């Protein structure tokens, strides 16, 4: 008998889901299993199918093929109001003629409050949860954007749904407020332990708040993993480029031990564990922060030293973004030195920091 690790029960499952609008295939055979209580984020460029995924889980779109399950129950044909989900959209969609209290209570139009409490008590609970206690009698027009989005969140949570769906809830807010409110959302999600699917095109937001991230491109899933894995071990070239910044170099694997690739005639040390064979075309990916501006000239085992010219530097406060030219390539380097580097520099790349993908960069 073999013992297997217990797997978390799926809170939401999309099983081979395809959604089309006329000739446009918005989702192409997508399968996702979101664990119960997990904060799961869909991230990808505009038009890749994030909102369609969320709307399909909510019941606003019907898949052409495939099934949707919520808490193990098949809901593919169930009307949105019969699914146990709360939804928050990008634009708060609060009713301007209703008070804050009435807006939150509107979330209870299909259901009684959970637990043995009155609607009034439930609304008070929720206002306190989103830190808006005492603001119940105001009208939405008297609230800031961030406050309005807190009310939209309270309204979505009012019936005590099993699943919370958030579609770009912060994108209409300014950067500082976005950062504050994302912490609030994450804290509330953890407090309630509610299964959450969050949509954003902002990869740094996705990395900051999620248990796991799905990177979506053109209606398909490129990678599903923890934020750390998506960043450190991108599953595809698309992920390597979309999540964070990356330098991409075309190379050809040489028949050397230890392994090296030739990039414009220069040998670059590759990770020992790489699986490409001699003669193969590869793309080398290296993060800007993995390239060091070095004092020394000599490369030790598993390192490559390149001589580059600094074109310009941007001061970021805690670091410099340094644009270098090397051998007809642009290389982006991130360095936390006190002064911006200038002129000719030696760049050191550790082979272990290089990711390889088959084929040349586009
Ligand atoms: P964004 O970040 O811009 O909101 P998204 O990743 O959420 O984009 P979707 O809105 O899911 O992308 O759209 C996926 C694809 O489906 C796009 O090509 C879009 O034009 C198309 N699409 C979405 N809704 C409809 C619709 N109601 N009718 C026709 N095409 C649609």
Image: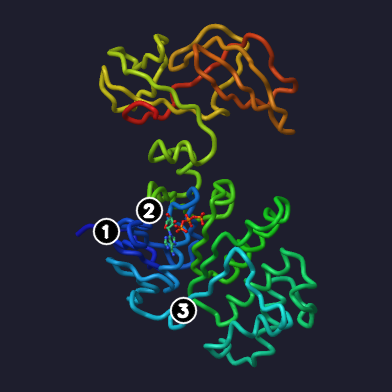
Q: In the depicted view, which residue is nearer to us: 228 or 94?
A: 94
Residue named by callout 3: 84
Q: In which quarter of the view is residue 71 placed?
A: bottom left
Check disc 1 and report its element: helix, strand or loop. Answer: loop
Residue 353: tell me if it is visible: no
State the residue at coordinates (54%, 20%): 330
Q: Residue furthest front?
A: 22
Q: Tell me: 336 left or right of 352.
A: right
The picture quadrant for ligand 1 comes to: bottom left
Q: Is 196 left, or right, of 11 in this rendering? A: right
Q: Position of residue 283 (x, y in %)?
A: 38, 26
In front: label 1 or label 3: 3
- What label sits on residue 124 in the rendered view? none
Please say if 248 is above or below 103.
above
- Evaluate if marks 1 and 3 touch, with contact meaning CB atoms under 8 Å apart: no
Mark 1 CB within 8 Å of ligand 1? no
Give the quadrant of residue 4: bottom left
Question: Where does residue 76 sit, x and y in percent of width and height?
Answer: 34, 74
* 3D distance between C-alphas at marks 2 and 3: 25 Å
Is 289 in front, or is 257?
A: 289
Q: Of helix, strand and loop, which one carries label 3?
A: loop
The numbered mark at residue 219 is 2
């Amino acid at each position: 008998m073999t013992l297997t690790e217990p797997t978390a029960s799926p809170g939401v499952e999309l099983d081979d889901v395809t959604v089309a609008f006329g000739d446009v295939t918005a989702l192409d055979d997508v399968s996702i299993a979101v664990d119960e209580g997990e904060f799961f984020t869909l991230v990808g460029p505009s038009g890749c199918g994030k909102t369609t995924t969320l709307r399909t889980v909510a019941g606003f779109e019907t898949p052409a093929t495939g099934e949707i399950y919520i808490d193990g129950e098949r809901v593919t044909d169930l009307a949105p109001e019969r699914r146990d989900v709360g939804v928050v959209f990008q634009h708060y969609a609060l009713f301007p003629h209703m008070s804050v209290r009435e807006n939150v209570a509107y979330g209870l139009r299909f259901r009684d409050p959970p637990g043995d409490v009155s609607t009034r008590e439930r609304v008070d609970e929720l206002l306190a949860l989103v830190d808006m206690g005492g603001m119940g009698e105001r009208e939405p027009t008297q609230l800031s954007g961030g406050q309005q989005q807190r009310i939209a969140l309270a309204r979505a949570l009012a019936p005590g749904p099993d699943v919370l769906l958030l579609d770009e809830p912060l994108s209409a807010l300014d950067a500082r407020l976005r950062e504050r409110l994302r912490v609030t959302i994450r804290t509330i999600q953890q407090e309630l332990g509610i299964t959450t699917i969050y949509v954003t095109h902002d990869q740094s937001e996705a990395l900051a708040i999620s248990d796991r991230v799905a990177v979506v491109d053109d209606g398909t899933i490129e990678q599903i993993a923890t934020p750390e894995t998506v960043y450190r071990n991108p599953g595809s070239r698309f992920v390597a480029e979309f999540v964070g910044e990356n330098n991409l170099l075309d190379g050809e694997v040489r028949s050397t031990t230890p392994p090296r690739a030739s990039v414009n005639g220069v040998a670059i040390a590759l990770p020992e564990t790489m699986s490409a064979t001699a003669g193969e075309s590869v793309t080398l990916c290296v993060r800007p922060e993995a390239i060091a501006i070095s004092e020394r000239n000599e490369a030790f085992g598993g390192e490559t030293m390149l001589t580059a010219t600094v074109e310009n530097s941007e001061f970021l406060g805690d670091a410099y973004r340094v644009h270098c030219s090397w051998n007809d390539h642009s290389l982006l380097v991130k360095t936390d030195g006190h002064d911006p580097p200038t002129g000719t520099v030696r760049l050191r790349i550790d082979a272990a920091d290089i990711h390889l993908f088959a084929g040349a960069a586009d």
